[in-house]
Image (cartoon, rainbow, N blue to C red):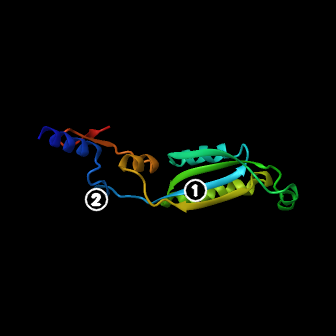
């Protein structure tokens, strides 16, 4: 009996028992941005200012021949690949940031696209990726405590 009570208290504290019924769930997408090496940090910083919690930078290398790169006007074969988990509601303003950066100069050009995220492994992971922070805590008995 004690373990059942303890389990119930933990669920109430984390709010995970009926999280989807108690809180609005926002769909998430992953945004990919492929740019020349050194340009990825700009997007990570700008997206962080917009409330994006999870952005990752990977290093890549192009595989096309030198002739193709010259034809397309791409000078650098070393690339930054930025992966950002974003809310669907934020995509338009993030696309504007990307378009403005690409329009500044030829050397800031790149490729950007989004892909669906169909599921995540648990409420805490979702809350981290969606940058959801509740401003109220629950007591051990499940009642809301004062604002933080």
Q: Can you see residue 8?
A: yes
Report the residue marked by disc 1.
31
Residue 30: x and y in percent read: 54, 56
| Front one among 36 and 78 | 78
Q: Which image quadrant for residue 133?
A: top left
Q: Residue at x 35, y 45 (%)?
A: 134
Give the residue at x 25% y 45%.
11
Q: Quadrant of the C terminus?
A: top left
Q: Position of residue 32 (x, y in %)?
A: 61, 55
Is there any visible trace of residue 143 in the rendered image? no
Label number found at residue 113: none
Q: Secondary structure at mark 2?
A: helix
Q: Is residue 52 left or right of residue 124?
A: right
Earlier residue among tags 1 and 2:
2
Query: Looking at the image, which residue sits at the far left?
Result: 1
Labelled pair 1, 2 in contact (Cβ < 8 Å): no
**Disc sitting over residue 21 in the figure:** 2
Q: Secondary structure at mark 1?
A: strand
Locate the N terminus and report the quarter of the image it occupies: top left
Q: Picture coordinates of residue 122 (x, y %)?
A: 37, 50
Q: Residue, x 76% and y 52% (percent of image)?
A: 62
Point out residue 143 in the picture as x, y percentages from the top left corner: 19, 44
Judged left or right of residue 50, residue 112 is: right
Residue name at image x 21 percent, y 39 percent: 139
Crowd tier of the residue under label 1, counting other residues whose Cα lies within 10 Å: few below 14, some 14–19, many 20 or above = many
Res 24 → quadrant: bottom left
């Amino acid at each position: 009996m004690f373990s059942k009570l303890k389990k119930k208290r933990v669920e109430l504290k984390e709010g995970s028992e009926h999280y989807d019924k108690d809180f609005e769930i926002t769909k998430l997408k992953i945004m990919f941005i492929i740019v020349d090496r050194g340009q990825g940090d700009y997007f990570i910083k700008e997206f962080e200012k917009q409330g994006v919690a999870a952005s990752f930078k990977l290093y890549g290398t192009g595989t096309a021949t030198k002739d193709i790169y010259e034809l397309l006007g791409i000078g650098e074969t070393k690339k930054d690949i930025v992966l950002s988990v974003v809310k669907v509601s934020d995509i338009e303003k993030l696309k504007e940031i990307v378009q403005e950066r690409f329009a500044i100069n030829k050397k800031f050009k790149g490729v950007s696209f989004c892909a669906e995220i169909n599921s995540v492994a648990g409420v805490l992971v979702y809350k981290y990726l969606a940058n959801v922070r509740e401003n109220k805590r629950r007591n051990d008995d499940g009642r809301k405590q004062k604002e933080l």
